Amino acid sequence: MTQVIVLNGGSSAGKSSIARALQDILPGLWLTFGTDVLAEALPGRGHDPKSGLVLEPDGTVTVKPEYRAVEEAWYRGLAVMAGRGALLILDEVFLLGGAGQRRLRGLLSDLDVLWAGVHCDPLVAAGREAGRPDRVPGMAVNQAVAVHAGVVYDVEVDTTGSSAVACARRIADAVTRG
């Protein structure tokens, strides 16, 4: 049985909305965690140089070793939770594409994980981003395609023309097919 669902997609692709819809659709109690939750826990919510996460003015994200160390501890903790019975939905942005997936796959190796790609047309994602004050302009366009490079998925959805609920149903079907 699936213990962890990993939603990977660029900024403003609709992952958080899909995660909330999955919580409503799937049986059982699913907890949602992700890269935004981790960033919120950092000093300055990721805007402090101590955090090791640098959001550049052009929308690129620079990740330093300090952040990677905290991120690894974060994932190890989530793996323990899932191993002890918690059902998790991880809302992720693989800035390193396939390398990011391989890193996370290694940390979750003892778990049954469903990998879901969340795609969105870069211009549509940029439009969504423009309406969100917590986003750095350019991030959605920079990430829309790059985060999927070299990533292998069990299921893929596209929020460009589909609702979060429709995408969540497709992912839930993949979970129930196991």
Image (tube, rainbow, N blue to C red):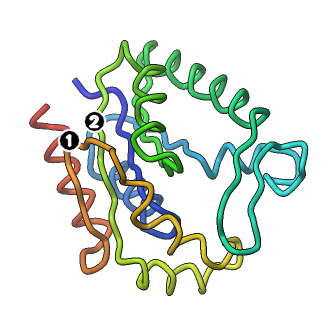
Q: Is residue 165 visible?
A: yes
Residue 8 in picture, x, y percent from top left: 41, 50
Q: Is residue 64 above or below residue 164?
A: above
Q: What residue sits 50% from the left and 75% below the top?
A: 141
Disc 2/disc 1 C-alpha distance (Å): 6 Å
Residues at circles 2 and 1 in contact by the CB criterion of under 8 Å = yes
Q: Picture coordinates of residue 86 (x, y %)?
A: 44, 24
Q: Nearer the viewer, residue 106 or 157?
A: 106
- Judging by the rendered image, the residue that carries numbered circle 2 is 114
The foreground one among 152 and 116 is 152
**Residue 58, quarter of the rendered image:** bottom right
Q: Which part of the image, by quadrant, shows the C terminus?
A: top left
Horizontal relation, residue 48 to residue 65: left or right: right
Residue type, numbered disc 1: Asp
Give whichever of discs 2 and 1 has the lower sequence position.
2
Q: Write the residue at 70% across / 46% down.
A: 63
Residue 13 found in image quarter: bottom left
Nearer to us in this view, 102 or 51 = 102
24 left or right of 9 in image = left
Furthest residue in direction left, as rendered: 177
Q: Is residue 116 above or below residue 12?
A: above
Residue depicted at x 26% and y 39%: 27
Q: Position of 42 compared to 141: left or right? A: right
User: Does dot 1 land on a helix, a strand or a loop?
Assistant: loop
For label 2, the crowd category at 10 Å Cα-Cα, with few meaning under 14, some 14 to 19 and many 20 or more, is many
The residue that disc 1 covers is 154
Residue at image coords 65%, 32%: 71
Residue 88 screen position, x and y as percent: 43, 34
Q: Amino acid at mark 2?
A: Leu
Relative height, residue 16 to residue 72 (above, below): below
